[in-house]
Image (cartoon, grey):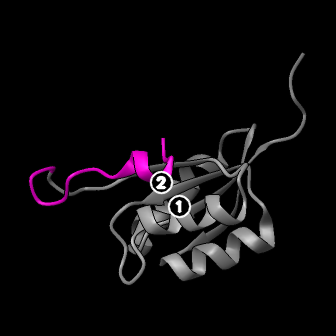
């Protein structure tokens, strides 16, 4: 039996083309729906409060509030929040801090 409710996703990335590409790729899946997009951490928090997605796809390297800090703030405010993070940076430049924010 198939779940009739789609996975509701918030896509967070400071690059417009990346957000558009991810959203377009995810929205063709019948069990997924991008409910909001954000280009920075502050906008991501507002979008989460408004849409309560079931999953957040978070770029870890954002201007202003980092993706890691944003994820930590989301989880502090919404303990059941689920986020997956990634970035195009080298490990030597910025060691991963995903564990601290409980980011997958």
Q: Which mark is residue 79?
A: none
At a point 15% along the width and 49% down the height, the residue shown is 91
Q: Is residue 54 left or right of residue 96?
A: right
Residue 47 vs residue 20, the one in the foreground: 47
Q: Is residue 39 visible?
A: no
Main SS of the magenta segment?
loop
Residue 23 is left or right of residue 16, and the answer is right
Element under disc 1: helix
Q: Is residue 40 left or right of residue 46?
A: left
Which image quadrant for residue 73? bottom right
Q: Is residue 84 left or right of residue 47?
A: left
Q: Is residue 67 magenta?
A: no
Residue 79 vertical placement versus 30 (above, below): below
Residue linked to disc 2:
101
Q: Is residue 32 visible?
A: yes
Q: Label 1: few (<14), some or many (≥20) within 10 Å?
A: many
Q: Position of residue 33 (x, y in %)?
A: 73, 51
Please provide the residue range marked out in magenta: 91-104
What residue is at 11 percent from the left and 60 percent from the top? 93
Point out the image quarter for the N terminus.
Answer: top right
Residue at (63%, 47%) from the top-left corner?
82
Are the residues flagged by discs 1 and 2 in contact, CB closer than 8 Å? yes
Q: Secondary structure at mark 2?
A: helix
Residue sticking out furthest to the left: 92
Vertical side of 42 occupied by 84: above or below = above
How far across and down, in percent of the image, does residue 77 sit? 70, 66
Q: Earlier in the sequence, mark 1 or mark 2?
A: 1
| Residue 89 percent across, percent down from the top left | 20, 57
The residue depicted at 35 percent of the width and 81 percent of the height is 63
**Residue designated by label 1:** 71
């Amino acid at each position: 039996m198939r779940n009739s409710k789609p996975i509701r996703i918030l896509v967070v990335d400071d690059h417009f083309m990346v957000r558009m590409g991810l959203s377009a790729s995810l929205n063709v899946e019948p069990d997924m729906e991008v409910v909001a997009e954000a280009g920075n951490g502050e906008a991501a928090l507002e979008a989460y409060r408004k849409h309560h997605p079931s999953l957040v796809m978070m770029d870890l390297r954002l201007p202003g509030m980092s993706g890691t800090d944003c994820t930590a703030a989301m989880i502090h405010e919404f303990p059941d929040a689920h986020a997956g993070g990634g970035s195009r940076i080298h490990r030597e430049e910025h060691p991963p801090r995903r564990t601290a924010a409980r980011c997958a």
